Image (tube, grey):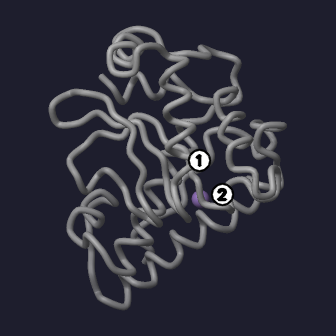
Amino acid sequence: MAQFTLPDLPYALDALAPTISRETLEYHYGKHHRAYVTKLNTLLEEGAKRYASLEEVIRSEKSGPIFNNAAQVWNHTFYWNCLTPSSGAKNPSGALGTAIDKAFGSFEKFKEAFQTKAAGHFGSGWAWLVKGTDGALSIVTTSDAGTPLTTGSTPIFVADVWEHAYYIDYRNDRAKYLGGLWQIANWEFAASRFG
Ligand code: MN3
């Protein structure tokens, strides 16, 4: 019996177009994300391991194949939630907006800093806005399946910078992909994470 299932996308496959095409989501969600779920279940079954939640897998395993697949499942679900087709708030308001201004000077400066860090990350990984254990916001990147969950930080927003996230739509132009993400960033979700 599979322990974990692929969560539904929170929108239709073509809902993020033209920033992220239906074809990208067919592959990225329908094949990559699904494959991490399938592989994770197979590895857990082989090892006769049972966990109550993905977070528990991630915090217990810390590295290795089970960690990698569990973290990729969690990271992708979080990424889909950080995006939205709705033309809602294009910038964060409330407590998160205030905290971004305080940490980075302004929302525009935050976007610049985030894009620079995400574009400059070598190889596959993720760029995150996180809230540290001291409550302060910062931008961090993780390699491969790495996730801030292992550091005690709270992920607020993420960009997948693996090539599979943008190669169909932008080829090798990671910076252009990152620039487009602001059109579909879900600041209401991010604000709910900030608390
Ligand atoms: Mn991905």
Disc 2 CB within 8 Å of nearest ligand 1 atom = no
Give the x, y percent position of residue 106: 46, 13
Depth check, mark 2 against mark 1: the one in front is: 1
The residue depicted at 39 percent of the width and 34 percent of the height is: 156
Amino acid of disc 1: Ala
User: Disc 2 versus disc 1: distance between alpha carbons?
Assistant: 22 Å
Give the x, y percent position of residue 101: 39, 13
Label 1 Cα crowd, 10 Å radius (few <14 / some 14-19 / many 20+): some
User: Mark 2 or mark 1, which has the lower sequence index?
Assistant: 2
User: In the rendered view, does 48 fall on the left or right side of 74?
Assistant: left
Are the residues at dot 2 and dot 1 in contact (C-beta closer than 8 Å)?
no
The residue depicted at 34 percent of the width and 80 percent of the height is: 64
Residue 24, picture quadrant: bottom right
**Which label belongs to residue 119?**
1
Image quadrant occupied by the N terminus: bottom left
**Which label belongs to residue 29?**
2
- Image position of 138 with respect to 51: above or below: above
The residue depicted at 80 percent of the width and 50 percent of the height is: 170
Label 2 Cα crowd, 10 Å radius (few <14 / some 14-19 / many 20+): many
The residue depicted at 36 percent of the width and 77 percent of the height is: 66
User: In the rendered view, does 188 fall on the left or right side of 134?
Assistant: right
Q: Nearer the viewer, residue 58 or 110?
A: 110
Element at label 2: helix
